Image (tube, grey):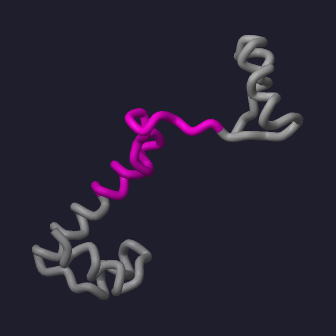
Amino acid sequence: MAYVKATAILPDELISEIQKYVQGETIYIPKLEDSYQKWGIRSGSRKMLDERNMAIKKLFKNGRSIEQLADQYCLSPETIKKIVYTK
């Protein structure tokens, strides 16, 4: 996470108000809840995993065994079971 100097983005009055509570410390200001994104949305990881899981389910429906899928995707048989037996 990159840090931004408060004096570069906040007005002096706001910095003075914040200094009443904390000085010389690093603080985290969270995003508003409505601007949260689910895990992997921005990086594309979520989409990649969803596509992988759909492919695993399709192969399983077409007769591929749990063990074969585990070997092919380098996942444990338990993980494959979670993927193929969930909706």
**Residue drawn at (63%, 36%) of the image:** 29
Q: Foreground residue, 47 or 65? A: 47
Against 18, residue 52 (above or below) is below
Name the quadrant containing residue 27. top right
85 left or right of 77 in image:
left
In this view of the protein, which residue sits in the foreground, 43 or 13? 13
Work out whether residue 58 or residue 30 is closer to the camera in this orientation and state it. Answer: 30
Q: Vertical placement of 12 versus 33: above or below?
A: above
Q: Is residue 43 inside the magenta stretch?
A: yes
Q: Which of the 4 quarters of the picture holds residue 52?
A: bottom left
Judge from the rendering whether residue 72 lies leftward or rightward of residue 63; answer left or right. right
Q: Where are the magenta residues, as a range?
A: 29-51
Q: Residue furthest right?
A: 24
Relative to the observer, which residue lies in front, 18 or 34?
18
Residue 81 drawn in magenta: no
Residue at the location (47% across, 42% down)?
43
For the image, the number of numbered tags is 0
Q: From the image, which quarter does the N terminus lie in?
A: top right
Location of residue 42 (image quadrant)? top left
> x%, y% of residue 53?
28, 64
- Residue at 23% of width from left, 63% of height from top? 55
Query: Dividing the image into 4 quarters, which one contains the C terminus?
Result: bottom left
**With respect to residue 76, does 19 lie above or below?**
above
Q: Residue at x 44, y 49 (%)?
A: 40
Position in image of residue 59 (x %, y %) = 18, 71
